[in-house]
């Protein structure tokens, strides 16, 4: 286990007293997990709550025809479970996207500390509420009236905001993004996704380099996904 308590540095727990975080830290453990490891399986009972300490993970579900549909890409400080209190199994999968450190704590231990300290309970509620808000926003952007290219532009703009690193050409998304992963995010065939990426690149909105994407014009990208106007 890490010598110092990294929970203290997470924005998720910014308002939680250090004594509570120390108790939470002692109740759990850190798991070092590799890429493609499935931490949470849909339909399985999950007896722990997981918090991302480093790296990134994806939360997804499977469509009726067995294709993966990515719902979230989550980074440092995110709660990876979509269900904490429910007695049923998880409805979603959580897979490690890149080598990560994950803090896991038994559900019973977390709930006991939440009962003792409302600040911790509030932090968990706020985190889950943000996920619901993001889900509602995504549903709005996946209505049939918005074209696929605008859907992908919206997702890339959001990733640049959440995981962007400033570079000379614009904002580089600090995630390895092969076409297959983008297709799973978009819910579209690989060929369609590749064509849309080419269109966005030709329009000067993105640059693709070794499966890394640079959003070269964030303001234009935002204007495009909201209005459909590339000018």
Image: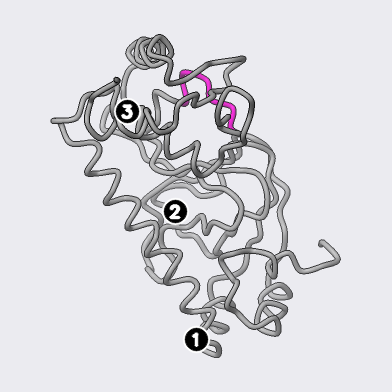
Which percent across, then down, holds residue 58?
A: 50, 41
Residue range in magenta is 175-181
- Side (left or right) of 41 relative to 55: left
Residue at numbered disc 3: 187
Which percent across, then down, holds residue 150?
A: 28, 27
Chain-order first, disc 2 or disc 1 = 2
Using the rendered image of the protein, determine whether residue 107 is visible from the camera's viewpoint.
Answer: yes
Look at 67% across and 77% down and name the residue there.
21
Q: Nearer the viewer, residue 229 or 212?
A: 229
Look at 56% across and 41% down and name the residue there.
163
Q: Nearer the viewer, residue 161 or 79?
A: 161
Tell me if mark 2 has few (under 14), some (14-19) or many (20+) residues whose alpha carbon lies within 10 angstroms of its own: few
Quadrant in the picture for residue 25: bottom right
Q: Quadrant of the N terminus?
A: bottom right
Residue at numbered disc 2: 44
Assign a secondary structure to mark 2.
Answer: loop
Tell me if mark 1 has few (under 14), some (14-19) or many (20+) residues whose alpha carbon lies within 10 angstroms of its own: few
Using the rendered image of the protein, determine whether residue 67 is visible from the camera's viewpoint.
Answer: no
């Amino acid at each position: 286990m890490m010598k110092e308590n990294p929970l203290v540095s997470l924005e998720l727990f910014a308002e939680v007293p250090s004594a509570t975080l120390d108790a939470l830290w002692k109740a759990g453990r850190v798991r070092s997990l590799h890429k493609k490891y499935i931490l949470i399986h849909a339909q399985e009972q999950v007896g722990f709550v997981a918090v991302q300490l480093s790296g990134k993970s994806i939360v997804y579900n499977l469509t009726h025809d067995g294709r993966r549909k990515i719902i979230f890409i989550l980074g440092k400080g995110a709660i990876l479970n979509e269900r904490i209190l429910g007695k049923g199994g998880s409805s979603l999968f959580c897979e490690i996207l890149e080598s990560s450190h994950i803090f896991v704590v038994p559900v019973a231990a977390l709930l006991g500390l939440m009962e003792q300290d409302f600040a911790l309970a509030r932090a968990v509620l706020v985190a889950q509420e943000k996920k619901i808000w993001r889900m509602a926003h995504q549903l709005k952007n996946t209505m049939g009236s918005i074209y696929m290219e605008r859907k992908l532009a919206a997702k890339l703009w959001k990733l640049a905001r959440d995981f962007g690193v400033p570079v000379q050409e614009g904002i580089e998304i600090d995630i390895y993004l092969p076409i297959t992963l983008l297709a799973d995010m978009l819910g579209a065939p690989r060929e369609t996704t590749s064509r849309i990426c080419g269109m966005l690149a030709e329009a000067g909105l993105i640059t693709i380099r070794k499966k890394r994407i640079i959003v070269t014009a964030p303001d234009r990208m935002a204007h495009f996904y909201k209005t459909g106007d590339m000018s």
